Image (spheres, grey):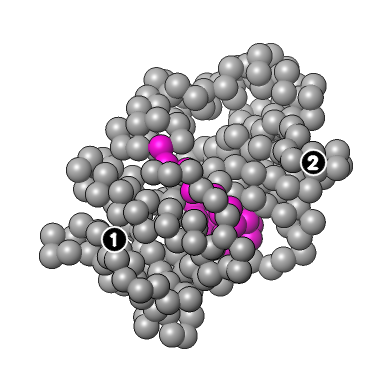
Amino acid sequence: MSDLTIEQLTIRELVTLDEYQACVAFQDETWGHGFSERVPAAILRVGQKLGGVSAGAFEPTGRMAGFVFGLTGIMDGSLVHWSDMLAVAPDWRNRQLGERLKHYQAERVRALGVRTMMWTFDPLVARNAHFNINRLRAFPSEYIPDMYGANTGSTLHGAIPTDRFVISWDLERALSVPPGDPAPAVGDAALPLLNPLDASGAPSCVTTEREPTVRVQVPADSQAITTASTELAARWRYAVRSCVVPLMRDGYRVARFVRGRGDTLPYYVFTRDSAPLPLPPT
């Protein structure tokens, strides 16, 4: 871990060609040199001309500790910002730098009149679910099966389908809502669990009469599972997909995310809305 404090970092827009190229190298280091979704220096620069954000967190030496990139566009007649990438160097992780980068991005686009920021994350990655839902209070609005294809060339994604939650972050409330509690609530253990583990430790999706509030669990460390067993990682992917897609189609939405404790895996708590939204078929 770096001896610097987070207050010693400077978060600002990328300016020089060297900084754009350093951001490309940062992507390679984070997702692997074969990552097909890598954003080149030219797009990082052009995006800034059209209301996008290409920003880095810099140490006093000029070393990049993290970056965020997104583009601004029109959706249903309103300005929306799509946050495409965020990455933090290993020695700066778990120090709230990602949160600071996201809030910097939010402030930049709020000044343009943007009121909604969107991005994706893997539903199986518990640490990202905690970051988005509990720290930022940004909630999934959609589930897209295999959004980027099953082979992005990234060492992080492996060879399983790249299912993603789409996040919609209400920037009107972003700075006023306190972080959520990641601990279990009273009564959580009695809520139906839709993807229990079988005797081999693999999940399945059970078909049952749904209660108004239900749970869907995810691995404590999805990356370790992907590295150890593609087959088990795929079982998790399809089990979570089989549970979540019908839930969201029927009007259920993520209300909370609970971090695991002991033998209890992390889980999403879904509650039913009154107005279901259509989702693409699996």
Instruction: List the single residue furthest toward the left.
Output: 199
**First of labels 2, 1 by sequence position:** 2
- Total count of labels: 2
- Residue named by callout 1: 205
Q: Based on the displayed image, in which of its 4 quarters is residue 133 positioned?
A: bottom right
| SS of the residue under disc 2 | strand
Residue 56 relative to residue 114: left or right: left
Label 2 to label 1: alpha-carbon separation: 37 Å
Q: Position of residue 121 (x, y in %)?
A: 50, 45
Q: Is residue 132 visible?
A: no
Q: Based on the displayed image, in which of its 4 quarters is residue 17 positioned?
A: top right
Amino acid on which the number 2 mark rests in the picture: Ser
Residue at left 20%, top 57%? 202
Q: How crowded is the residue under tag 2: few (<14 C-alpha within 10 Å), some, or many (20+)?
A: few
| SS of the residue under disc 1 | loop
Residue at left 47%, top 85%? 186
Residue 223 relative to residue 198: left or right: right
Q: Position of residue 197 (x, y in %)?
A: 22, 64
- Residue named by callout 2: 78
Residue at left 45%, top 61%? 247
Q: Position of residue 251 (x, y in %)?
A: 54, 63
Q: Is residue 23 visible?
A: yes
